[in-house]
Image: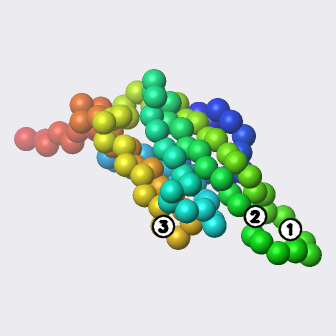
């Protein structure tokens, strides 16, 4: 199962589908080049920085700074199919399940 290793500044949502998993992280104001994603020894890590907007703020509740999030991948995750995309301030990491671990429907004869 997924487990988070570090506290951070970026909220995360993890969804399981029939074919895999999707990890979504909110990173408004970040650029694609500032976000790094890698898998090493069954641990998926996402790092980056949420930069504070320029100018004087009257009030601020959002958090900014460098962050690292790490997640231990489940046994059925296919580490060779991990893909990451970034759109509208959200990075999405898609992980397919291993074929032999997917549920199989059995037709009743």
Which residue, given by chain and number where applicable, does mark 1 sit on?
60
Q: Disc 3 vs disc 1: Cβ atoms closer than 8 Å?
A: no
Residue 52: assigned label = 2
Position of the C terminus, as image quadrant, is top left
The Cα–Cα distance between marks 3 and 1, rounded to whole angstroms, is 24 Å
Who's the residue at 74% across and 52% down the image?
Answer: 65
Circle 1: element type: loop
| Residue at the extreme left | 109
Numbered disc total: 3
| Residue at the extreme right | 58
Q: Disc 2 vs disc 3: Cβ atoms closer than 8 Å?
A: no
From the image, state whether disc 2 or disc 1 is nearer to you: 2
Is residue 15 visible in this depiction of the protein?
A: no
Who's the residue at 87% across and 73% down the image?
Answer: 57
| Residue at the extreme top | 41
**Mark 2 or 1 closer to N-term?**
2
């Amino acid at each position: 199962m997924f487990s988070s290793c570090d506290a951070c500044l970026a909220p995360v949502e993890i969804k399981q589908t029939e074919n895999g998993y999707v990890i979504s992280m909110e990173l408004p104001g970040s650029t694609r080049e500032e976000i790094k994603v890698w898998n090493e020894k069954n641990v998926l890590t996402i790092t980056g920085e949420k930069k504070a907007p320029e100018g004087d703020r009257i009030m601020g509740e959002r958090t900014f700074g460098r962050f690292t999030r790490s997640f231990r991948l489940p046994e059925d995750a296919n580490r060779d199919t991990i893909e990451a995309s970034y759109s509208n301030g959200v990075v999405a990491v898609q992980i397919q399940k291993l074929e032999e671990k997917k549920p199989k429907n059995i037709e009743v004869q």
